[in-house]
């Protein structure tokens, strides 16, 4: 029990803010200490019986040890006898977690914080409220490029800053339950990051279509109507996921696709070639991102069905053909099969999605709410794979951030759930992306359902309120032992409040994010004011039904013929006017094409994306 009331004051004169400061600043004394925690004996009220409120959970305190001051976080307060006395002072026991120490460095006696502890508190050491200079030293980023994202919960006059380079380069995660402000925090982080890193490109996988309005001055929107992702950019397993609508694929049909797609690609490159393809170093595979025509693929299936030796496999061929034709004619897959001209548009497609060049809008909001659920996984797999390859083959010149909202959908902890290629593509970014300039941002409300390998690669975590015990345990396992008690506040934090820990901050920090303008809050554009319900006549029921069916009133029939294009024609060029009989052919020659190639500007040869960088 703490009974000594005749303390002489602090032993370190440099700790005083004012020489006239009374000795009452001494709040307690150390009565127990081990390698990570200490117990302080103090009083909950003053000598006049008034409750001081100086000891509260979550407060930082310092313990004077001569040349250094040990910093502790209050995580528990208790009164031994569990009874409040009104006739005398009430002694309490304060449990603190030791997180580091502050030392004054000559000649200016500037306080410097160190996470390690060289001198542990002795029994009887004086504890007191930490001063502002020491608090600033604890969260100082020591020369790293910092951005302000809010203020400390401990002292709202002190800025909460993060090291933006370390936060991005080593990936980050924002976790928290629904309604605590995750999307608002992400919008704030993106705006601050784009100011500090103007060369950064951002791809947001947005399942709720909420980020584009909040980033209107920085972002372009790609949705189900504007997405143009040709089917030949899909790898075999991604295309199979689309054709089989997320169900288990038939192995026989997959083998046929693996055999026939390279032949169709060879037909596109060499229109006069036969049914056999050349085997060698440059042989095409079903995964090579080279255009081909669905008309050629269907024709090959018909030819195979007509052969005598394939009579036993005709049901498999017929089933595959039916499956392909159903996907081609499905209006929901318009973004894959809508092009009447099959051409090498990889430069145009990649440049549009990944903003090369960005024209002042470096953010792409990929809105998935209008996409069929069975193709979302495949599309995300393609985009994540292209992001990594683009950063890899640009040799570090292109910096890309892939931000995954509701990340547990694409990277579930259970390997039997989700789509394996999507999980592998995003895991590859998490494990290797920082070496090549491809970064990952993870946003989820259920970290317990997220692949632990991906979460462990996120070196900076912003943990907002979490009520689920399993989710809290996941975050607790990721934080350093010296700051584990900080997470005891996870279930009771307020709006816009978070605990940040990892490489992006100097030490574990409880902060409150800046308040954003309502126009910049994701999802605010879709919220309607409380008004009277609309009359039935004001609702366009016919338009709603058309959107439900995903069939436009003026839709044109899809073409599966795949009209051939000249191999000399580059992606994105307008189709030439049809020649009249007897008119001379004025199309450019190959030599003329080399004078004006369409290039991404990052050393990529047209038509060889993802294969080999062009050396200068």
Image (spheres, grey):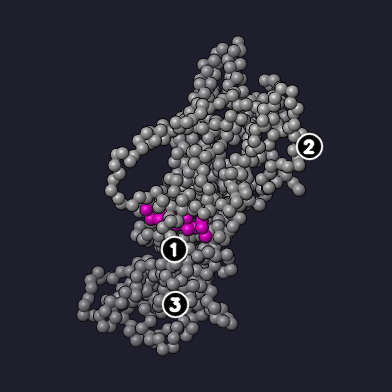
Query: Alpha carbon of mark 1 to alpha carbon of mark 2: how far?
Result: 57 Å
Residue 182, percent from left and from top? 42, 54
Residue 540, percent from left and from top? 36, 37
The rendered magenta stretch, by its main secondary structure, is classed as helix
Disc 2 packing (10 Å; few <14; some 14–19; many ≥20):
few
Residue 172, percent from left and from top? 51, 54
Left or right: 598 in relation to 549: right
Q: Earlier in the sequence, mark 3 or mark 2?
A: 3
Q: Earlier in the sequence, mark 1 or mark 3?
A: 3
Q: What is the number of the mark on residue 131?
A: 3
Q: Answer yes or no: do the residues labelled 1 and 3 have beta carbons within 8 Å? A: no
Q: Earlier in the sequence, mark 1 or mark 2?
A: 1
Left or right: 344 in relation to 181: right
Q: Is residue 5 above or below residue 349?
A: below
Q: Quadrant of the N terminus?
A: bottom left
Q: Taking the image as drawn, is residue 121 in sight?
A: no
Give the magenta range.
179-192
Residue 572, percent from left and from top? 64, 38
Q: What is the number of the mark on residue 591?
A: 2
Disc 1 packing (10 Å; few <14; some 14–19; many ≥20):
some
Q: Which quadrant holds residue 43?
A: bottom left
Query: Alpha carbon of mark 1 to alpha carbon of mark 3: how far?
Result: 23 Å
């Amino acid at each position: 029990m703490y009974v000594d009331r005749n303390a002489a004051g602090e032993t370190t004169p440099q700790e005083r803010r004012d020489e006239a400061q009374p000795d009452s600043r001494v709040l307690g004394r150390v009565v127990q200490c081990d390698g990570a925690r200490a117990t302080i004996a103090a009083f909950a009220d003053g000598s006049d019986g008034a409750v001081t409120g100086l000891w509260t959970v979550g407060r930082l305190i310092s313990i004077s040890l001569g040349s250094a001051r040990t910093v502790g976080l209050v995580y528990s307060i208790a009164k031994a006898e569990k009874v409040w006395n009104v006739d005398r002072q009430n002694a309490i026991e304060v449990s603190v977690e030791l997180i580091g120490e502050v030392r004054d460095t000559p000649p200016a006696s500037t306080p410097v914080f160190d996470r390690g502890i060289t001198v542990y508190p002795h029994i009887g050491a004086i504890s007191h409220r930490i001063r502002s200079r020491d608090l600033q030293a604890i969260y100082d980023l020591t020369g790293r490029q910092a951005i302000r994202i809010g203020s400390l919960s401990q002292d709202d006059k002190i800025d909460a800053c993060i090291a933006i380079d370390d936060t991005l380069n080593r990936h980050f995660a924002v976790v928290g339950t629904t309604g605590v402000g995750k999307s608002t925090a992400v919008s704030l982080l993106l705006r601050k990051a784009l100011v500090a890193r103007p060369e950064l490109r951002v791809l947001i996988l947005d399942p709720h279509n909420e980020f584009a309005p909040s980033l209107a001055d920085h972002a372009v929107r790609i949705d189900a109507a504007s997405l143009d992702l040709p089917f030949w950019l899909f790898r075999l397993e991604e295309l199979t996921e689309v054709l089989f609508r997320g169900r288990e694929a038939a192995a026989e049909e997959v083998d046929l696709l693996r055999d026939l797609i390279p032949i169709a690609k060879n037909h596109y490159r060499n229109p006069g070639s036969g049914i056999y393809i050349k085997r060698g170093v440059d042989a095409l595979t079903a995964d090579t991102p080279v255009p081909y025509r669905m008309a050629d693929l269907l024709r090959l299936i018909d030819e195979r069905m007509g052969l005598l030796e394939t009579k036993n496999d005709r049901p498999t061929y017929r089933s595959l053909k039916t499956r392909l034709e159903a996907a081609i004619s499905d209006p929901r897959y318009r973004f894959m099969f809508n092009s009447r001209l099959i051409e090498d548009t990889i430069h145009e497609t990649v440049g549009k999605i990944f903003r090369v060049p960005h024209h002042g809008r470096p953010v792409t909001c990929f809105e998935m709410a209008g996409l069929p659920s069975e193709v979302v996984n495949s599309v995300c797999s393609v985009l994540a794979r292209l992001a990594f390859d683009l950063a890899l083959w640009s040799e570090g010149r292109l910096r890309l951030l892939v931000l995954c909202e509701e990340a547990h959908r694409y990277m579930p902890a259970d390997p039997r759930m989700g789509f394996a290629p999507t999980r592998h593509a995003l895991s590859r970014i998490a494990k290797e992306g920082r070496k090549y300039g491809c970064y990952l941002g993870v946003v989820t409300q259920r970290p317990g359902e997220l692949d632990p390998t991906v979460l462990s690669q996120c070196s900076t975590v912003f943990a907002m309120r979490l009520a689920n015990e399993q989710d809290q345990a996941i975050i607790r396992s990721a934080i350093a032992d010296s700051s584990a008690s900080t997470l005891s506040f996870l279930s009771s934090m307020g709006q816009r409040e978070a605990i940040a820990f990892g490489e992006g901050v100097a030490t574990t920090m409880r902060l409150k994010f800046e308040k954003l303008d309502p126009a910049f809050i994701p999802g605010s554009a879709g919220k309607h004011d409380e008004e009277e319900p609309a009359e039935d006549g004001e609702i366009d029921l016919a338009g709603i039904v058309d959107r439900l069916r995903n069939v436009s009133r003026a839709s044109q029939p899809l073409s599966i013929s795949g009209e051939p294009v000249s191999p000399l024609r580059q992606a994105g060029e307008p189709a030439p006017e049809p020649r009249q009989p007897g008119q001379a052919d004025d199309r450019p020659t190959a030599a003329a094409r080399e004078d004006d190639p369409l290039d991404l500007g990052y050393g990529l040869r047209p038509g060889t994306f993802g294969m080999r960088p062009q050396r200068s």
